[in-house]
Structures are given as C-alpha cells and as structure tokens.
Image (spheres, grey):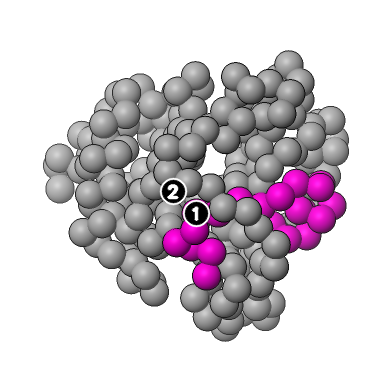
Amino acid sequence: MIKELQVTGVYTTNTYFFIDERTKSGFLIDPGAQAGLIYDTVKNNGWKIEKILLTHGHFDHLGAAELLSEKLGAPVYIYPSDSQYLKDPYINLSANTDHPIIVSHYEELFNGENIRLKENSGFYLKVIHTPGHTPGSVTFYSPVEQAAFVGDLLYQHGPGLTNFPGGNRYELEQSIINKILTLPPDTVLLSGHSSPITVADEKRLLLRE
C-alpha cells in the first residue's frame, strides 16, 4: 500500500508511506517537514515504520527525518555519496532558512540492495542509484507494486534540476534513460514535487522534447 502525504516547510514535498497491509509495518520515504503531521498519520493508522528512506540529501526531503527517527524508533537511510548532505546545511540547502538542518544519525544503503521488512522479508524496495540531481540520489523500486519513488530525479513535466551543488545534467539524463525508462512501461513514477506519471507516459513526454 502506498500513501502520499504533502508536507510543507519552505517548499511543499510529497512524503510517502510504503506499508505492508498484512503487518501494518513499512517504510517512510522523504519526510521533508511537519514531523507532527507525519507522526500523527502513522499513529492514527496504526502503522509501524521500520525504516526512514531518503531519496537524496536536500533539506526539503529530510527536514523531519531526525525527529521522526527518534519518535518512531526507525533509523534513517541514505546513499553514501549523499551522507555529506546530512552534516552540512550549506550543501543540503537549509543554511539560508530559519532552521538549518543536520541529521546526526543515519545508516547507509547501496545500489542493488533490497530494503526489506523484518516481519515480512517478501515486502521490499530495491535501491537503484540514479545520480544527477545529487551524487547520491536513488530511486526506490517496488516490482510488486509497479511503483518507483524517484525523488527529484524527474517530475511529471520532465527531468529534475541540476543547478544545485553536486548536480550533473549528463548523469541525470543517463539515470533517466538507462535506469528509469527501462523499467516496465506501467511502472508509476512517484516524485517529490509533482503528480504521478507512468514510465510509458514519461518516455513519450521526453521524446517530444
């Protein structure tokens, strides 16, 4: 089960819950802001969050991660190339906001790894390293649900941005072409700041450009 929750700090970001309906356990993806709202959503639905997963290290995707990690007892996971973003408000872009953000405690995840639940090892997300927006941007892919959480790699209207520290346009384009558009056509792409779009529709959009 996939549930989207829009949270607003400086920007509005799509936070996602990926929950096993049988065990009510699951993953929280990109908790960008409003820790209280996210926490209440978890508790009101009777969910147990086992892991907090970050698609990349920008503040609008991790602003509530540390507090929720403490309150939910769930570790934060990020790709090694983006771990520096958690330690530096200038790189994660929060330095010029009212609340510079640092995430002190985190674990690392790796390309090709399957992130599984403790209570149901068949419920998992595959980590696909998709650099370009940041060096350590990843996509979390569920072949069972035919869904991919792509962060800011791309949006409903096209490719993501690369004009931030660590951004690389060539890498982003290669990630989209070689790692996203090669997923099954019906795969739903769930981004950080737009409505869902299928791989087939995204491919048609990009071919028109």
- Give the percent coordinates (x, y) of residue 26: 69, 32
- In the structure shown, which secondary structural element does the residue marked by tag 1 occupy? loop
Queried whether the magenta region covers residue 20, the answer comes back as no
Q: Over which residues does the magenta segment extend?
A: 65-84
Which residue is found at the position 60% from the left and 19% from the top?
Answer: 122
The correct choice, above or below, for 98 with respect to 149 in the image is below
The correct choice, above or below, for 159 with respect to 139 in the image is below
**10 Å neighbourhood of mark 2: few (<14), some, or many (≥20)?**
many
Pointer 1 residue: 79
Choose the circle earlier in sequence order: 2 or 1: 1
Front residue of 187 and 137: 137
Report the amino acid beneath label 1. Tyr
In this picture, residue 206 sits left or right of residue 157: left
Which residue is found at the position 69% from the left and 77% from the top?
Answer: 99
Queried whether the magenta region covers residue 83, the answer comes back as yes
* Residue 7 visible in the shown view: no
Look at the numbered discs 2 and 1 and tell me whether their residues touch, using CB distance below 8 Å: yes
